[in-house]
Amino acid sequence: MDILQIVGLGLVVCVLAIILRQQKPPMAVLLSMVAGIIIFLVMLPQISAVFNVLKDLANQANVNMVYMSTILKIVGIAYIADFGSQICRDAGEGTLAAKIEFAAKIIVLVMAVPIIIAVLQSLLKLVP
């Protein structure tokens, strides 16, 4: 599915959600959520292809795969948290969306600690 089809789907769902929101607001939110999930699932092959390319590049550059997998997990967490928080905002739950984003930031920080330690240890080895 290319971008024109995705945008077309998004616009159709947007118009339908606007119409539904007047009659049945919960159905409008559900419709938006389903459309978002469909778009996400359609994009999974492209996301997977990018991750595979990055892993291949890391192997060629002799980068420790532990660090590379952590970075990819962090990127995944960021995207998933953003997706979830946008769904919450669409449903009118801005406070819950903020909490999801906060939790994602904490998880990213915790996951980044080993990478930060490795960078600092490398710097300490360079300094006499």
Image (cartoon, rainbow, N blue to C red):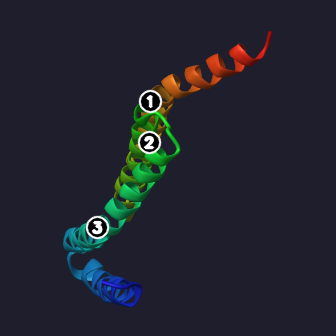
Q: Nearer the viewer, residue 64 or 26?
A: 64
Give the residue at the far right of this rendering.
128
Q: Nearer the viewer, mark 1 or mark 3?
A: 3
User: CB atoms at circles 3 and 2 under 8 Å apart?
Assistant: no
SS category of the residue bearing label 3: helix
State the CA–CA distance, disc 1 to disc 3: 25 Å
Q: Position of residue 75 (x, y in %)?
A: 45, 48
Give the residue at the far top of this rendering.
128
**Residue displayed at 42% across by 58% down:** 53
State the CA–CA distance, disc 1 to disc 2: 7 Å
- Tell me the quarter of the picture where residue 68 sits: top left
Report the residue marked by disc 2. Answer: 74
Q: Amino acid at mark 3?
A: Pro
User: Badge 3, how many Cα within 10 Å: few under 14, some, many 20+?
Assistant: few
Q: Nearer the viewer, mark 3 or mark 2?
A: 3
SS category of the residue bearing label 1: helix
User: Badge 1, how many Cα within 10 Å: few under 14, some, many 20+?
Assistant: some
- Tell me the quarter of the picture where residue 86 sits: bottom left
Q: Nearer the viewer, residue 110 or 10?
A: 110
Q: Nearer the viewer, residue 103 or 39?
A: 39
User: CB atoms at circles 1 and 2 under 8 Å apart?
Assistant: yes
Look at the picture and state if 100 lies above or below 67: below
- Pointer 1 or 3: first along the chain: 3
Report the residue marked by disc 3. Answer: 45
Look at the picture and state if 94 lies above or below 34: above
Report the residue marked by disc 1. Answer: 111
Q: Position of residue 72 (x, y in %)?
A: 42, 45
Q: Amino acid at mark 1?
A: Met
- On the question of residue 105 being in view, the answer is yes
Look at the picture and state if 27 lies above or below 48: below
State the CA–CA distance, disc 3 to disc 2: 19 Å
